């Protein structure tokens, strides 16, 4: 075989291989573009059906990654990779990776549970996985919360489903549980009237259910009251802070004492 023949074969090999690479790149980038368009179309169709946004985002993620697997397989086939053998290798590797990443797979399973059982949705304020905040997104592996002080917390889904979930604003109304203490020398009826007037003066407090004002305990150094009005969930914190301030000012104006812990120390001098 002469040098010219060898050069032609090398040139032909490089040319064919270059075309394979170019074809693979086209398949990958065009396939990714088509995948994004299809996922976007799927999201619009689901939104028209008034499906929950949380479920839409979750299904979009699954659809996108599933389509990308198909694109990668087509890309590998264009490069001349035996996809049958590749699938066998991928399956064996997947088993090994699955065993090594069992916690991550657990997070995926937990993500599916969160989406389909819906203990909360995007926009809810919840306490879950040791975090209290507004739900920003629920992905395959984790859930993102925005805390009241504007921190972005990423919590693994498994950590959420393995603990108690409290959906703070799931219901339209909430009850305020306030505790106030007065001295034994103060008049209970006068104090009850102060509490009642403070509640009636705030239009945000609901009439139904009716507020509850009761003596809860005769403690060691105080008489304790439970003051329990109902408010709309969105008014909860504003009403709570306002009531505490207004009731304190009203008690001060009426000369009602608010006991606080005190310790008496008695010193005895002994003669030596």
Image (cartoon, grey):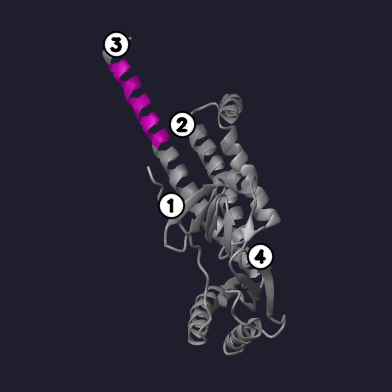
Total number of numbered labels?
4
Looking at this rendering, what residue extends furthest in the top direction?
Answer: 1
Mark seen at residue 2: 3
Quadrant of the drawing holding the C terminus: top left
Mark seen at residue 48: none
Q: Which residue is mark 1?
A: 268
Mark seen at residue 51: 4
Residue at 50%, 57% in the rendered image: 145
Q: Nearer the viewer, residue 214 or 153?
A: 214
Q: Is residue 213 magenta?
A: no
Looking at this rendering, what residue extends furthest in the front direction?
Answer: 271
Looking at this rendering, what residue extends furthest in the right direction?
Answer: 209
Q: Position of residue 175 (x, y in %)?
A: 65, 73
Looking at this rendering, what residue extends furthest in the left direction?
Answer: 3
Q: Could you give the CA–CA distance between mark 1 and mark 4, rounded to whole angstroms?
A: 77 Å
Q: Is residue 42 visible?
A: no
Specify the principal SS of the magenta part.
helix
Q: Residues within 10 Å of mark 2 (few under 14, many from 20)?
A: some
Q: Position of residue 75 (x, y in %)?
A: 49, 37
Q: Could you give the CA–CA distance between mark 2 and mark 4, rounded to whole angstroms?
A: 40 Å
Mark 4 secondary-structure assignment: loop
Is label 3 in contact with label 2 (beta carbons under 8 Å)?
no
Mark 1 secondary-structure assignment: loop
Left or right of 23 in this view: 65 = right
Q: Nearer the viewer, mark 2 or mark 1?
A: 1
Mark 2 secondary-structure assignment: loop
Range of magenta residues: 4-21
């Amino acid at each position: 075989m002469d040098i010219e023949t060898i050069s032609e074969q090398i040139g032909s090999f490089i040319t064919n291989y270059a075309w394979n690479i170019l074809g693979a790149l086209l398949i990958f980038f065009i396939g990714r573009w088509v995948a994004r368009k299809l996922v976007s179309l799927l999201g619009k169709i689901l939104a028209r059906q008034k499906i929950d946004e949380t479920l839409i985002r979750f299904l979009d993620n699954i659809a996108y990654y599933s389509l990308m697997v198909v694109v990668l397989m087509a890309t590998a086939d264009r490069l001349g990779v035996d996809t049958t053998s590749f699938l066998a290798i991928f399956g064996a590797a997947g088993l090994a990776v699955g065993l090594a990443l069992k916690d991550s797979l657990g997070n995926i399973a937990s993500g599916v549970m969160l989406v389909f059982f819906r203990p909360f949705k995007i926009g809810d304020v919840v306490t879950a996985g040791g975090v209290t905040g507004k739900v920003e997104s629920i992905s395959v592996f984790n859930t993102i919360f925005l805390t009241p002080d504007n921190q972005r917390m990423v919590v693994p889904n498994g950590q959420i489903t393995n603990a108690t979930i409290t959906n703070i604003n799931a219901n339209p109304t909430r009850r305020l549980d306030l505790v106030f203490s007065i001295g034994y020398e103060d008049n209970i009826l006068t104090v009850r009237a102060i509490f009642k007037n403070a509640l009636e003066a705030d239009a945000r407090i609901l009439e139904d259910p009716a507020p509850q004002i009761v003596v809860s305990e005769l403690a060691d150094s105080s008489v304790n009251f439970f003051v329990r009005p109902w408010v709309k969930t969105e008014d909860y914190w504003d009403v709570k802070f306002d009531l505490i301030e207004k009731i304190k000012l009203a008690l001060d104006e009426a000369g009602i004492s608010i006991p606080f812990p005190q310790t008496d120390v008695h010193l005895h001098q002994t003669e030596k």
